[in-house]
Amino acid sequence: MGALKNIVAATGLLAAAGIGETVYFYNRTMKRGNAKTERTTKMSGTDWAKYFPLMEERKKFVMVQPHRDVYLTSFDGLKLHATYFPAIDGTEQAEKIVICFHGYTGEGLSNHVAIADYFLKQGYAMLLPDARAHGESEGEYIGFGCLDRQDALSWIRWTIRECGEKVKIMLHGTSMGGATVLMASGLELPANVKGIVSDCGFTSPKEVFTHVLNHMYHLPAFPAIQGADLLNKRLAGYGMDECNARREVQKAKVPILFIHGSADTFVPCSMCHEIYDSCKSSKRKLIIEGAAHAESYYKDMDAYEKALTEFSEEIMSQ
């Protein structure tokens, strides 16, 4: 009898420990304000300091271009924010536009000042949304692409209203933004969307967090991931593997350019290969040797911009 009581007590302690671990993990990673940019930057393994001079130089050009804040209401009632840059040639209604989706704990404008220099000079208008629970957008729970893909569809519709029925749209996303555009590829997208660029996108929040726990913290995914999945379904309304980019690209109809750094330890390059292999639409792949997480553009700007230009010429001619 005493042994049975000890077993029951031990089981209770383990369950309590599991609950505590789950709640800690969930609050630390899934809720606005607790997910810290500094922690994410450190985990990504990218030395961003060496690129700050380039970012500041390009920011000088980008920020003097006409731009304005724009807003819409999401499918679940959140006020979402974006920064809109018209084409710099002064065209009243843009002929082509790129919608850029940032990564986890990022912001639309600040995360894209470097690549905005390229896109604006290529004649694109730009829309830079703040993801839900980021920047100036409302929301308490981070969408990790699963909810953000619906927000992406809302921004696509906003763009068509703003720029006209003939506008040609490219979607570009980095990290969580890359997952967002890949997950969006499985939706019924308007014909205006001509192509998608995913830079270091992941398969699903469940799989990327399992990788982080196993390979970066040397911790088991159970029970934190399973518990967080249950919590997230109740609090945020989606499961952590409910939407998986590897599955969604099997339904894709638009061309996709996949970009990834070979030295990415945060979102492993193997995820890019898996999603690429699953993709049923026209596709291209660029692996930047030695690039860490989200570093590809800065590590080899010539190769990255060459790939973008060739892809753009292909999709915008359709």
Image: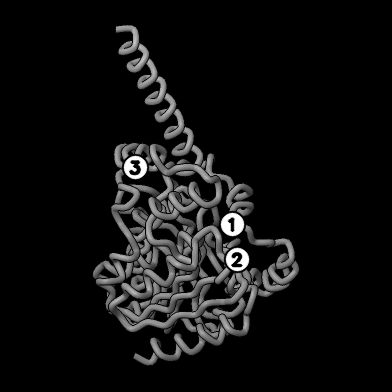
Q: Which residue is mark 1?
A: 44
Residue beneath the point at 64% across and 69% down: 63
Q: CA distance from mark 3 to mark 2?
A: 28 Å
Q: CA distance from mark 2 to mark 1?
A: 7 Å
- Dot 1 amino acid type: Ser
Q: How many marks?
A: 3
Residue beneath the point at 55% across and 87% down: 306
Q: CA distance from mark 3 to mark 1?
A: 23 Å
Q: Which residue is mark 2?
A: 292
Q: Which mark is residue 10?
A: none
Residue 288: percent from left, percent from top: 57, 76
Q: Nearer the viewer, residue 230 or 271?
A: 271
Give the quarter of the image for residue 139.
top left
Using residue 19 as the reference point, say whether residue 124 is left or right of it.
right
Q: Which residue is mark 3?
A: 229
The secondary element bearing badge 2 is classed as loop
Q: Nearer the viewer, residue 1 or 290?
A: 1
Residue 272: percent from left, percent from top: 43, 69
Residue 149: percent from left, percent from top: 35, 60
Residue 57: percent from left, percent from top: 73, 72
Lower sequence index among marks 3 and 2:
3
Q: Nearer the viewer, residue 168 or 229?
A: 229
Dot 3 alpha-carbon crowd within 10 angstroms: few under 14, some 14 to 19, many 20 or more: many
Give the quarter of the image for residue 151.
bottom left
Decide if residue 213 is in sight here. Answer: yes
Compared to residue 233, the image places residue 19 above or below, namely above
The image quadrant where one finds the C terminus is bottom left
